[in-house]
Image (cartoon, coloured by chain):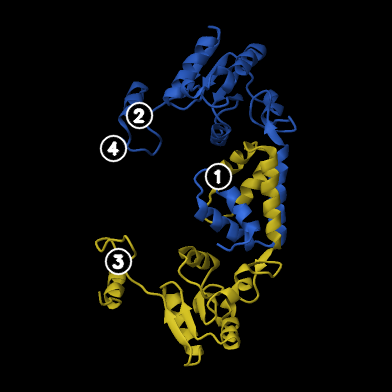
Chain colours: A blue, B yellow
Amino acid sequence: MKIPEQLEEVIKHFSSFQGIGEKTATRFALSLLNWDKTRISHFSEAIENLLTVGKCPKCGFLAVENECRLCEQSNHRHTHQICVVESITDCMAIQKSLTYSGHYHILNGVLNPLMGVGPEEIGVEGLLSRIQERNYTEVILAINSTVEGDATCSYIRDQLPEKVRVERIGFGLPMGGSLEYVDALTITKALENRKQF
Amino acid sequence: MKIPEQLEEVIKHFSSFQGIGEKTATRFALSLLNWDKTRISHFSEAIENLLTVGKCPKCGFLAVENECRLCEQSNHRHTHQICVVESITDCMAIQKSLTYSGHYHILNGVLNPLMGVGPEEIGVEGLLSRIQERNYTEVILAINSTVEGDATCSYIRDQLPEKVRVERIGFGLPMGGSLEYVDALTITKALENRKQF
């Protein structure tokens, strides 16, 4: 095809996003051409500015020049609780629910020995030393219920001293979900986790 | 949510693409953070470079500083045929099929009087004067079969002198398509457009 290489370059970058094929990438690139010039420049600058964003060395959340908004506010939050998640997006999802007011710790994914991902790769050491230093008494494992997630939770629990209360988030029927359409394992969990009403 | 504003800015831009919601935009922005720094800079530059890309004043295809690759090559192509399409993506689709070797003209969409889109808005005037100047003898209307597309085709045909042969692309069963799943109108067209075998 005889399209300008400037456009081809942008298409190449867009199509490297997960779930974006060449057609969608082309659609994105062509729609950019309809933006006004200042908006294109702003978009370009915004992407360049991402270079200042990294990960907080303490909690693993997003940080700009090592200043993490979660850690900054940590004194205003419950200082005995720490919630462990496997990704930044999971942390953002919990923040959105507005129901948790303790600290967070974001791991680098979950254990996956078959793929060579061990405790070091996901940063368990940093979590353990942080729990010890800051004397957290309650660790909430908000890690998804996959085989790897389960293994990660067991591993972390076994590494923690007994005085620390370790909890895992509840599993069951999602709100608005229907028993008819939910899988058998979720129903099993929902029955196991029943509460007096 | 307590995410850095640098990231929020990028999310805002991504979510202005058609079909991209806040969640997907966030996923894109976070995946950018995992790219290495030079790649992020290249992406940013690539977008900035789009500012040099515009539309060819002659044919309406993409042009860099008014140099359009389609028009540059026009002498090496069949000079009596012109194919009229409603968008750059449609033109690219035809180019990909490698079966057409005449000239192209890209309209600015199709007529849509209810939305205030008349012949001037889609640039019919430019097409007509180009056909007259260059003495094209064959005009192929490769415009989609919507109500607006049909109206646009009729309008253009009526504006052209009788000596110009005006054709519309064929409609029928798509290759690999199954009569069982195709709509009634397509079957009607396929029967109308049958050919001796």
Furthest residue toward right: A65
Seen in the picture, residue B95 relative to A166 is either above or below; the reply is: below
The answer to whether one can see residue B15 in this image is no
Q: Position of residue B60 (x, y in %)?
A: 60, 73
Choose mark 3 or mark 1, whichever is in front.
1
Q: Identify the chain of the residue marked 2, using the numbered disc in the image.
A: A
In the picture, the disc for residue A180 is 4
Quote the CA–CA distance across marks 3 and 1: 34 Å
Secondary structure, mark 4, is loop
Q: Position of residue B111 (x, y in %)?
A: 51, 78
Report the residue marked by disc 1.
Answer: A17
Q: Residues within 10 Å of mark 3 (few under 14, many from 20)?
A: few
Discs 3 and 1 carry the same chain letter:
no
Residue nearer the viewer, A114 or A59: A114
- Do the residues bearing badges 3 and 1 touch, measured as CB atoms within 8 Å? no
Name the residue located 30 percent from the left edge and 66 percent from the top edge. B183
Q: Identify the chain of the residue marked 1, using the numbered disc in the image.
A: A
Quote the CA–CA distance across marks 4 and 2: 11 Å
Discs 2 and 1 carry the same chain letter:
yes
The amino acid on which the numbered mark 1 sits, given as a three-letter code, is Phe
Secondary structure, mark 1, is loop
Furthest residue toward front: B76
Report the residue marked by disc 3.
Answer: B183
In the picture, the disc for residue A186 is 2
Name the residue located 31 percent from the left edge and 61 percent from the top edge. B177
